[in-house]
Image (tube, grey):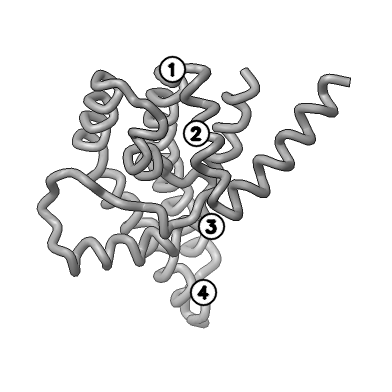
Amino acid sequence: MKYLGLFAVFFFISTAALAKHDSDHPLTADDWKEVMDKVVLLEDSGLMPTLLPVIMRNQDTLELTAVQISAFRAWRKQNYTHMVNVMNEIIEKSVQFRVEALSPRTTSDHLYTLQSEIHELQRQLLNIKLSCRELVTTSFTEAQWENFAFVVADIPKLASLMSQLSSLDLEQLH
């Protein structure tokens, strides 16, 4: 259970530099760079970044089974395009909001509507990411959680969180 808590925290903070798509996709290298640049914009403000690229890149260290790898690839194949499209919409609407907020002709009601649209897109994105989280949390073994903690120890933000979470776990034991 301790490692489930670790994973929950790690799912909330990650660096976009870790994002990597390692399956067949219709994107060119330039297209992929543009997508990743946009993901960077969302990673810092998003509640739950995608860690599947970290997991897949470290599948040997995590000792993923063939069944897990297949399930993660199937999830990515089913959800990747939709997730990127939703992320792009969030970015576009956020930019639109900022631009229109500066216009004296824009009404407050219009800005409320735009904000509601952005929040709905963020909920859609969270639902997609939660489906991935569910797949990971229900399939990882105790040893894989330990290996995951080892893998993210080299990532400064996550290592710091791990330290904080370990302290929190110790406090809860007392």
The x, y position of residue 64, in whole percent, is 34, 25
The x, y position of residue 167, in whole percent, is 79, 35
Whichever of labels 4 and 2 marks the residue nearer the N terminus, that label is 4
Residue 138 is tagged as 1
Whichever of labels 3 and 1 marks the residue nearer the N terminus, that label is 3
Residue of label 3: 45
Residue of label 2: 148
What's the residue type where badge 2 is placed? Answer: Phe
Examine the image and state in which quarter residue 150 appears. top right
How far apart are labels 2 and 3 at the CA level? 24 Å
Q: Secondary structure at mark 3?
A: helix
Q: Nearer the viewer, residue 61 or 137?
A: 61
Which of the two discs, 2 and 3, sits closer to the camera? 2
Residue 29 is tagged as none
Mark 1 Cα shell of 10 Å, populated few (<14), some (14-19), many (≥20): few
Query: Residue at coordinates 42% horizontally, 52% vertically from top-left?
Result: 117
Whichever of labels 4 and 1 marks the residue nearer the N terminus, that label is 4
What's the residue type where badge 3 is placed? Answer: Ser
Residue of label 4: 101
How far apart are labels 4 and 2 at the CA level? 43 Å
Q: Secondary structure at mark 4?
A: helix
How far apart are labels 3 and 4 at the CA level? 19 Å
